[in-house]
Image (spheres, grey):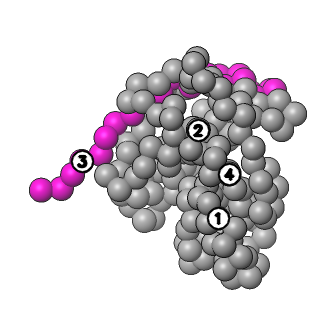
Amino acid sequence: MAIKATIYKADLSIADMDRNYYQEHALTIARHPSETEERVMIRVLAFALHADPALAYGKDLFDVEEPALWLKDLTGAIQTWIEVGQPDEKRLLKAAGRSEKVVVYSYSATSSIWFKGLANKIERAKNVSVINIPSEISAQLEKMAQRSMQLQCTIQDGQVWLTDGTDTVQVEREVLRGAL
């Protein structure tokens, strides 16, 4: 018998002063049985950083043809393809060909080693950005994970803070390739 996804619900309030985006989102997140709460929270963070009414969660761990998140225009063309973790070069090159922009959020202590092995292989994909979230930050975010969450994300002058009302995490982002 297959293990089913665990459902997380998050009320996410975003105040992104850098983009003049102020909105509340009610998120339903399906956590794959093999997925950690740390990865769930990195997906929530990625949503906050790219928030848009058309941004949607993909079925990435359930369906290899979809990313963690994606933003499509009204014609169905993919504007932004967002990966979480350490995808291989084939997946990134395919995503780069299918979308205008690809953003990868890595968060493991081994991200620098993974990226060194990947950098030359994705050289021709100019639309791919790789952002590393330090493992100590992702561990702090993981502690916020609950089946039902009330989160606020504030973004100003490139600085990012995520809070659950009890704890606040200042999210540092390290650009390994591309731009924020």
In the rendered image, the quadrant that contains the N terminus is bottom left
What crowding class fits label 1: few (fewer than 14 Cα within 10 Å), some (14-19), or many (20 or more)?
some
What element does badge 1 sit on? helix
Question: Does 118 sit above or below residue 140?
Answer: below
The residue located at (78%, 70%) in the rendering is 126
Q: Is residue 52 visible?
A: no
What element does badge 4 sit on? loop
Query: What percent of the width, then of the height, locates residue 101?
Result: 70, 58
Residue position for label 4: 134
What element does badge 2 sit on? helix
- Residue type pointed to by label 1: Ser
In the rendered image, residue 37 lying in the magenta stretch gets the answer no
Using the numbered discs, state the Cα–Cα distance from disc 4 to disc 3 in whole angstroms. Answer: 30 Å
Question: Does 109 sit above or below residue 153?
Answer: below
- Residue type pointed to by label 4: Pro
What crowding class fits label 2: few (fewer than 14 Cα within 10 Å), some (14-19), or many (20 or more)?
some
Residue position for label 3: 4
- Residue type pointed to by label 3: Lys
| Most foreground residue, 148 or 178 | 148
- Residue type pointed to by label 2: Gln
Residue that sits furthest to the left in the current view: 1
Q: Which residues are magenta?
A: 1-24
If you read the primary sequence from the N terminus, does the residue marked by circle 2 or circle 4 appear first?
4
Residue that sits furthest to the bottom in the current view: 121
Residue position for label 1: 111
Judged by depth in the image, the label closer to the viewer, 3 or 1, is: 1
Q: Which mark is residue 140?
A: 2
What crowding class fits label 4: few (fewer than 14 Cα within 10 Å), some (14-19), or many (20 or more)?
some
Question: Does 29 sit above or below residue 65?
Answer: above
